[in-house]
Amino acid sequence: MTETPTRRRGDTRARIQEVALERFTENGYDQTSLREIAEDLGVTKAALYYHFKTKDDILESLLSQASTALDELVAWMRAEPSTRERRLEMIHRLAGITQGVPGDVMRCVQQNEVALQNLGTSLVHDLKVRLWEAAIPDEASIEDRLRIRMAVMTVLIANKPGNDLGGTAAERTAAALEIAEDLVR
Amino acid sequence: MTETPTRRRGDTRARIQEVALERFTENGYDQTSLREIAEDLGVTKAALYYHFKTKDDILESLLSQASTALDELVAWMRAEPSTRERRLEMIHRLAGITQGVPGDVMRCVQQNEVALQNLGTSLVHDLKVRLWEAAIPDEASIEDRLRIRMAVMTVLIANKPGNDLGGTAAERTAAALEIAEDLVR
DNA sequence: GTCTATACGAGGATAGAC
DNA sequence: GTCTATCCTCGTATAGAC
């Protein structure tokens, strides 16, 4: 019954996310203006405000996928006591997530760490922190706490955009997992 | 001959740096406005522009101390071929710098990593990168490159403000150096 | 339901008076 | 050496056309 429009419509929200994801990842959240995004789509700034409450809201919407995957990982980690085997398994799963989630989303998360910290809504507030806190056994020393943290960061850094480590994503991840074996104990 | 002014003057530049250092470290570079700094000093925004070319310029001026210390470390590292002993010594010296430099400056550097990356003038551009590049031997594998990088980051993270690792600065640094021993090879 | 037009206050920055 | 006045862009908000 309803006409199919000649130009694709109703996907404006998705197209905003598309452009924002690219810009936020490439140039950073703070350096990306709403005007820039709007012009790229051929709409006005105000149109963005129909689809999203604020600029922050756009960023958050991009993170839901990564956030969900990491939430599940945190839940999995918390389900049973933290043994070395489980900690290592967590690191491996994390590596899978960093590559599994639509690549650009994870890159965007890492590229905008600081912007994320300044988001009041801590639903996505410091995904890393929640992760390593779940992994730290109760009686851990400072060194052990730092070790787990560095293992998590090694995996993330190995996949960080522009890290100029060279090699393929698979090679970098493999190297990160080797190092994590040394770190986690 | 020249009158001593009733209120101290001529030190406005230094006072700007004082306030900026505190604000940038506490609230972040992007979240600190020039109006905020100016009002705190009882001057106008425009006055700041007499002493500094841009807002970025203020940030850069704060970093000169840390930058100098790290430049020297890079130069030292490059002076001789990179052996394991030298790499470890470099990490130890780095730990000394992170505590030796007037504490707040180093904290400011770490608190504003991203802002620094966006500074065109790469005099201070990614202090860390210059450091680990100097430390990496020519034929290093991806894993070895990543290992050195993580060793540097471990030291920096151990001293990062708000990392909630607990313990004293000395304890955290000691832990970081232990871990670095495992990483560097 | 989707968007344009328009405006506001705050941001960084500049020219020029004093 | 410091300020006023001004400019452009930013994120945000609302009224109303379609």
Image (spheres, coloured by chain):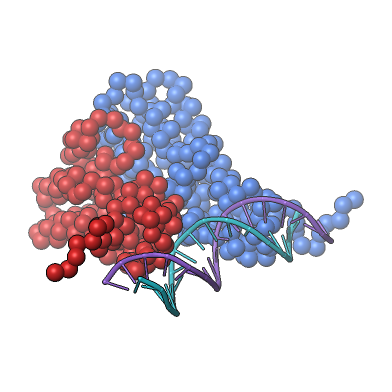
Chain colours: A red, B blue, C purple, D cyan
Residue name at image x 34 percent, y 21 percent:
B138
> Front-most of B5 and B33?
B33
Res A140 visible: yes
Residue name at image x 38 percent, y 32 percent:
B132
> Front-most of A11 and A6?
A6
**Residue B90 % position (x, y):** 40, 32
Question: Image quadrant of residue A159?
Answer: top left
Residue name at image x 29 percent, y 30 percent:
A166
Of the 4 image quadrants, the one containing the N terminus of chain A is bottom left
Please say if A109 is above or below A78.
above
> Front-most of B8 and A97?
A97
Does A146 sit left or right of B131 as displayed?
left
Of the 4 image quadrants, the one containing the C terminus of chain A is top left
Res A182 visible: no
Please say if C16 is above or below A165.
below
Give the total of numbered labels.
0
In the image, farthest residue toward the right: B1
> Front-most of B129 and A11?
A11
**Residue A53 % position (x, y):** 35, 69
Question: Image quadrant of residue B126?
Answer: top left
Does B163 sit left or right of A67 as displayed?
right
**Residue A25 % position (x, y):** 34, 48
Does D13 sit left or right of A166 as displayed?
right
**Residue B22 % position (x, y):** 54, 58
Residue name at image x 26 percent, y 57 percent:
A7
